[in-house]
Image (cartoon, rainbow, N blue to C red):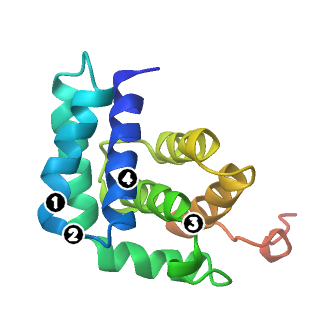
């Protein structure tokens, strides 16, 4: 497992616990410190990456959750499992708000892998569907194959 992937896993675990506990923002540093101590042995620079990722997601939470509503319209945000909701938050942040720090396909793949590792049997497919639709809209590709115009 790469150090960046481990840092994302720790960020996800921290967001999960924060969300599960009712989103006590003041408690985030303590939750992150505990998770880094427990699971982040050997991480150095990536500790800062995990902290910045969490802070950035929290700072963009309203916009990120609006995108979840838009791209998963059959699933109200509060009805999505806590782990899937936070995987989507992480993936959407890296895809839409993270700039050029992470290539889009890497952001999507990382989120899918987190879904497979921490979510339920359908988490990877669900995350892939939501993030894939967002990515297609970002690059201007039709999300419905029948919308593609044939080129002659």
* Gap in angstroms between the C-alphas marked 3 and 1: 21 Å
Disc 3 to disc 4: CB gap under 8 Å: no
Question: Would you name the residue on which mark 3 appears?
Answer: 81
Q: Are marks 4 and 1 in contact (CB under 8 Å)?
A: no
Return the mark for residue 127. none
Which badge, 4 or 2, is on the more N-terminal residue? 2
Alpha carbons under labels 3 and 2: distance apart? 18 Å
Quarter of the figure with residue 151:
bottom right
Point out the tag, 3 or 4, that comes first from the N-terminus. Answer: 3
Q: Which mark is residue 94?
A: 4
State the image coordinates of residue 115 (x, y, percent, origin top left): 59, 47
Image side of residue 135 versus residue 35, left or right: right
Mark 2 is surrounded, within 10 Å at the Cα level, by few (under 14), some (14 to 19) or many (20 or more) other residues, namely few
Nearer the observer, 142 or 80: 80
Please, what secondary structure does the residue beneath circle 4 have? Answer: helix
The relative height of residue 46 versus residue 14 in the rendered view (above or below) is: above
Task: Mark 3 or mark 1: name the one nearer the start of the chain.
Answer: 1
- Gap in angstroms between the C-alphas marked 4 and 2: 23 Å
If the image is split into quadrants, where does the C terminus sit? bottom right
Q: Residue furthest top?
A: 42
Question: From the viewer's perspective, is the residue at label 4 or at label 1 nearer?
Answer: 1
Q: Nearer the viewer, residue 76 or 109?
A: 76
Q: Which residue is mark 2?
A: 24
Element assignment for label 3: loop
Labels 3 and 2: the sequence-earlier one: 2
The numbered mark at residue 27 is 1
Marks 3/4: CA distance? 20 Å
Do callouts 1 and 2 mark residues in contact (Cβ within 8 Å)?
yes
Label 4 – label 1 distance at C-alpha: 23 Å
Q: Are marks 3 and 2 in contact (CB under 8 Å)?
A: no
Q: Secondary structure at mark 2?
A: loop
């Amino acid at each position: 497992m790469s150090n960046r992937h481990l840092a994302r896993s720790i960020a996800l675990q921290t967001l999960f616990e924060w969300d599960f506990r009712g989103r006590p923002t003041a408690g985030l540093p303590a939750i992150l410190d505990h998770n880094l101590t427990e699971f982040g042995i050997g991480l150095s620079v990536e500790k800062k990456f995990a902290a910045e990722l969490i802070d950035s997601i929290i700072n963009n939470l309203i916009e990120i959750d609006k995108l979840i509503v838009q791209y998963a319209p059959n699933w109200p945000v509060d009805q999505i499992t806590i782990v899937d909701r936070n995987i989507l938050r992480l993936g959407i942040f890296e895809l839409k708000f993270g700039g050029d720090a992470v290539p889009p396909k890497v952001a999507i793949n990382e989120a899918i892998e987190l879904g497979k590792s921490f979510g339920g049997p359908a988490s990877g497919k669900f995350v892939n569907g939501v993030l894939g639709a967002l990515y297609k809209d970002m690059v201007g590709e039709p999300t419905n194959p029948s919308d593609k115009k044939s080129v002659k």
